[in-house]
Amino acid sequence: MAAISEAVPQTADQYNEDILAVLKPPSPLYVLAVLGLLGLVGAGVVALAVQTYFGMGVTGLMHPVMWGVYITTFVFWVGIAHAGTLISAILFLFRASWRNAINRGAEAMTVFAVITAGLFPLIHLGRLWKFYYMFPYPNQRGLWTNFKSPLEWDVFAVGTYTIISILFFAVGLIPDVAAARDRVTDWRRHLYGILAMGWRGTSEQWRHHSRAVLHLSGLATPLVLSVHSVVSWDFAVSLVPGWHTTIFAPYFVAGAIFSGMAMVITVLVPVRRAFHLESYIRLEHFDNMGKFIVLTSTIVGYSYAVEFFMAWYSANPYEQMSFWHRAFGDYWWATWIMISCNILVPLPLWIKRVRMHVPTMWVIAIFINLGMWFERFVIITTGLSHEYSPAAWGYYTPSWVELTILAASFAWFLMLFMIFLRLFPVIAIQETKELHYHRAEGH
Amino acid sequence: MPPAMRIPTRAVVSFCALLGTALVVGATASGLYDYTDDELSGPEQPIQFSHAVHASKLGIECLYCHTTADKGQHATIPAVSVCMGCHQWVKEGASPGSAEEIAKLHEFYQQGESIPWLKIHNLPEHVQFKHFRHSHAGVECQTCHGPVESMNRVWLVPDTVLRPSSAFLPAAKLEMGWCMNCHLERGAADDCAACHY
Amino acid sequence: MPEIDRRDFLKIVGLSAGAAATAACREPVEKIVPYLNQPEEVTPGIASFYASTCRECPASCGLIVKTREGRPIKVDGNPADPISQGRLCVRGQASLLRTYDASRLAGPLKRAADGNLVPTTWEDGLSILVDKLREHSGKVAFLGGLETGTLDGLIDDLLAAIGSPNRVRFEPFAYESLRKANEQLFGTATVPQFRFERADLIVSFGADWQETWLSPVKQQIGYAEARRGGKAFAVYVGPRLGLSGADMDEWLAPVPGTEMQLALALLREVALVKRADLGALSGRLRSQTTAGAAEATGIPVERIRRLARRIADADAPLALPPGNEMQGSNATGLAAAVQLLNYASGAIGKTVVFGPDHNLERLGGFSDLKNLAGRLRSKAVGMLLVHGANPVYAAPALGFAEAMASTFTVSFASANDETTALADLVLPDHTPYESWGDAEPLRGVRLLQQPTVRPLRDTRATGDVLLEAARALGVGESLPAGSFKDAIAARWADVGFDQALANGGVFNPAPQRSVTLSAGAATAAFENAKLSGEGDLVLLVYPSLGLYDGRSARFATLQEVPNPVTKLVWGSYAELHPDTAARLGVEFGDVLRVTSEAGQLELPVVVHETVRPEVIAIEAGQGHQPVEPGAPDPDYLKLRSQIGANAFTLLSGKTDSESGALAWLSAKVRAEKTGAKLLMPLTQPTFDQEGRGIAQATTMAAVLGLDAGNHHAPAHGGEQHEPPYADAMHLETVDFDPADDARSPDYRWGMVIDLDACTGCNACVTACVQENNIFTIGEELVRQGREMHWIRLERYVEHHGDEIEVRHAPMLCQHCGSAPCEPVCPVFATYHNDEGLNVMVPNRCIGTRYCANNCSYKVRRFNYFAYDRFLREPEQLRLNPDVTVRSKGVMEKCTFCVQRISAAKDQAVIEGRKVRDGEVIPACAQTCPSQAITFGNHKDPASRVSKQRADGRAYWVFQHLNTRPAVTYLKSIRRGETGKA
């Protein structure tokens, strides 16, 4: 900890002071920002309405590229959703105490990301109004769903993940909303009241609470691996050259953590600045997250290499053509954006000084987000555009509808996050307090 | 007890109330209770034609008017000329008010316009239903159409079946589950492509 | 995407608000309205069939029209008819659209004072017609297309009655030079029949024998028959390898204009070998050395010799005289040379038979049109009646537009066209499916044409109009009594009208007659074609497979059927050889400005190696003026207001000196780059199959089993083997039996497609469109890659040194035994049924499109828009009620015509038996003139598909993927050492 030379709060109350400071009435700038995001979301809704009314033709989709921006964005957000659980659950189990400062933000991010992701499988349906056919609900027709279909697996994987992450978030929130409940007087009091579930901080409740968190962590941990594995199987179990490969599950999970970490940084840096939380989200956190990124970036880079190697080594001409096309074909630009953003840009993070330099971290994180979106775009689009039959090759360009909805999804995510910022303590007070006391003992 | 404790109870109560209404509304919307009184007595047709009179009292065969029920895809409503076949002479029946109704028929025919009957037994366009396959398989008209011969006004006799395969959810008459029920019982085709192409 | 107007926007807002609410709405009450009077033979739900005649081109194929509830929904060939023999071409299949054409004329029009055509009543129209006829009697001219039936006589009688026998029968494809040549050589100015089915060697001098030339369907059937099992070698001579040429084994491309020398050299050599007596001609041939020909044509001596030897050795050789695209200033001479070749090789009377002749001798030609134009200018003709001809479009060089200006013109066209737009009075005729008629395409082969639908517009049969006019003029007594139908009945009385009506006509072809070389032959003029105009490119205008001379250009469906060579739709394009393109510095999609003596056009470039380097090839038939109400109107399917460009405007009207035929191959043109570039509506991005073995070929040796190395292991051998042909991927394949892929004990439906027979003629594609309610979506959406055709007719070009080999493979749903599309659908909208069909249930589909992604053959089609909204009244009448119209957002694909399977099973069940082999025929198989497609039941070892599947040529596309396709392809056969497989 020597390297960290920042003022550490001395008294426990100061935590409540600092952290709950967010609960003061919002600045007009904040309101403006939220309204702006809301507007963008509105644009997305109109775009979706247009698509629903006229049909999928308003997108850029065509033969043979039947999936495009929507599925790309779906996978992207599912990926983002991973960092939260990783930080909260896994690091909790590993007792990586440094996580405490950032886990609340990360968990919130997870919830919002998975909610956003969940929208896209619906948005990309040709008949959105029939989406419920995908759920195995009892119906008079006696029709069932096809459990062999990876899309059906998605329904469950994403569904489970949503529930668990929301639970995890809510439970972790209890002591803090209780603290908040007792200091506000307006309508928020009721909200906190409900969420606090009558928390009074008795030792009894504390024991139950820590137990709950422990068990939820146990439940959530395997999900981090399973959810994105399942999502990756959407592609891996298919016959499409460039999709049909066994490396996808680990490759996607690593990518998910990679992009998730990057998104945590992207979001927390401004928050840290805005709410003067420098003394809580401290450089050590960035250092650690930086290490995570370096690790996962390396795994992802390795996966890219392996994909190309296998394409060559398999001596399967379809596979070879597909990957040649990926690197040097119509979509070369996307591929090279992906490679440079995900492999080259993170390289400086091997150096500690870079990891400790917040602005640099932030810029790198943003590039990684970009790169990881393009990774999914490349996999989906290049795979489909150059399949088996040369007579059915094609080039896909997204339409304004797709791009609007893509932008709206980011707006939607950020909007939810900003509302969260104003409503709840972005840093887990109690856990940070623990950290404080531990540190105090350490002295 | 602290205020915090009371709030959730209220919340819980209101939540349950909300859920309850949602369920009722949903159930109604999903068409479980599909039959209005007016339908049970049958909607009013342009002409008060009574199957009871023609089929039961006079004992006219179904196929006499619905000629292609055993030959073609549709059972077909008889052409006005077919009605006129008898009614150019039969200008009044036994039942009261029959004269007026027959007069309507004559009017339609003289006007040279056909009779806009209301369709009672209606299948969606994506169903390729073949009447003759069913009559050939020995399915009675009444199985699907109910005791038409005793009706003064044709109406869709409500019938719902509960099948294990559909988790005992009620399938109303002419809904897919209802068709499937019979198909499975009789060992008829259970292939989607039998009716949907 | 579609424009959003205010109403749409409101709908959208409403929708986004109340989407949830609408889900629970009750269905609206539907009315069910019976017939007033039950028409006999029309039973709702049961189709009735009528024999009739196709009038899309002079070939006049016999038809069987399928009608439901009194409206025709599908046409197919009449098996009793010796011409169509139950098959139809791409145009025949689409011919219903002329009747269901939304932009047809609604009723009679007359030229108002303000110079516009305005609607009028028939009474008014007729009175005007009668007055004008009276006024101009003696100076009336009738310009019509080829009529070979009652109407023909009727017109003559009428003209005679009013004392003005000015009759021009004009067809843009009139075969004048061939008739002239036959007159010179054999003293009979007729067009003989070319009996492909008897030939063992076919040499086409630029005759597009399966596109527009003479009787395409009959000829294609004959060709397939002659070639079955690897027989009959075929050679194409001409500057461009069109559809007809592409299927032939060898391509000789002489320098344009020098075809004559090639023909004469061949004639000389063959005559020498065969010791044919050419009389005085033989002297003139001495100078025609093969070396000289090779020199001029740029074809190696040995290839000419080889061809000559083939002809001489053949038992029944057949040389086809030039088609329109090779009709130059020496057309008659060239035709004569080719006919002499036939004579010398002994083909006359064997494969080239006089009697029954094509009924074309009364047909006029370009020259007649020319003097008509002259007489219009000189006021020798005061009134012009136009029926079934469009000279303003087809002969721009003659300046008909201004010639007609001062003449009172009456048009009988049922839909607007360039000529009709300039007419002073328009009395629209019924369409063929609405009217009575008859035709005699071959001497003695007489077909009847009967109405199958009540006229959809306020039109009248021209025959009746003429009769009425005649009676009003008081010359009625010289014409048949009663209506036009009575006239036909009377004319057919001798052969039994009713019987003929049931059969579709009477078919007793005139007997064959022998011809001898007349002395006139000696005078035949043999010189090279003259190419005039400055510029270094030779203009090759070729007739269109889909649009004929342009008369079918208004059919959106045909506009969307890909050009068999370029695979482009909705437009006309300039085809260049790669070298030429490189020289001009243009590539695919660049717009060229093409300038000839006669005119100038701007066309996007298509680059492919199947044209000679100095040639620029343009398809005829496009570029119709957008006239309102007119052919496809601009906002319909969001089309450009004018589709393509009219290639005829580049022809200066030069003619063949002897026959007066329009010289198509006569212009040199200049082409320069404009800098503009277009996005092209291309349906197949590459013709290189990357050695993936999609369209495979084998050698004659392998077929005969001489060459074990190339021989395919028996299909049921069970052992694994190397892919049988070099260009198939060397990936492990496993043999399988499709019969295993169906739980039903009785049926496993499957298809066999013989690629050796398939010529890529697109007839199957169009038949499929008509049968299965496949929507036409317009240029813009095709460009975006949303094409809907269930059959993609893939065309691949293979290179063997400098030789080019074209292969075709119809690609449709393979109904795989283990289909990649099935497991990935989350809702079972697509699944494998007990009879082995890969079923697609549109109403269960939610549109995840995963199936299409996972389909290795890329044959699934997605409804990107609500295409039924694209239908315009009365187009919806042609929809097949047995096939569900797919809504937006659902997937669709080939169903093996499941509705026909279902119908056959109904019959079988009622008769208490199994479906017999050949009882189920999908639309594609039914119409295929080459009979390349066989459909049947793999559970029945005796079925044709089971037998053919065991053929040594059988293979399965992407077999290594182990999808176990139910569609078996038979490799095409490479005859001879070079050229096409």
Image: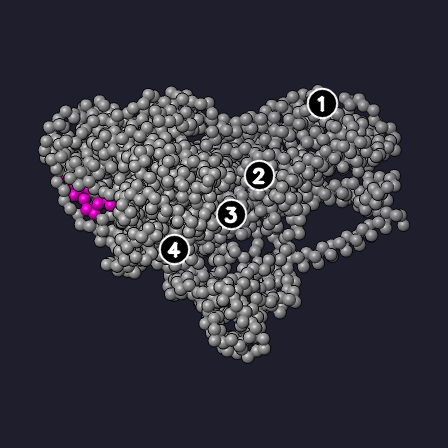
- Residue C337 position, x and y percent, is 19, 33
Q: What's drawn in magenta, residue-wise?
A: C346-359
The residue at which mark 4 appears reads as C452
Say which of marks 3 and 2 sits in front: 2
Q: Name the residue under label 2.
A: C3
Tag 1: Cα neighbours inside 10 Å, few (<14), some, or many (≥20)? few
Element carrying mark 1? helix
Instruction: Please report, as a chain letter, where disc 4 is located.
Output: C
Disc 3 vs disc 4: which is toward the camera? 4
Mark 1 or mark 4: which is in front? 4
Q: Mark 3 lies on which chain?
A: C
Whole-number angstrom distance, CA of label 1 to CA of label 2: 46 Å
Q: How is the image coloured?
A: one colour
- In the rendered structure, are the residues bearing label 3 and label 2 in contact, judged by CB atoms less than 8 Å apart? no
Q: Residue C868 carries which label?
A: 3
User: Which residue, given by chain and number where applicable, does mark 1 sit on?
Assistant: A359
Real-space Cα distance between discs 4 and 2? 38 Å
Q: Which of the two labelled residues, at mark 4 and mark 2, occupies the earlier sequence position?
A: 2
The x and y percentages for residue C712 are: 31, 42
Circle 2: residue type = Glu
Q: Which of marks 3 and 2 is nearer the N terminus?
A: 2
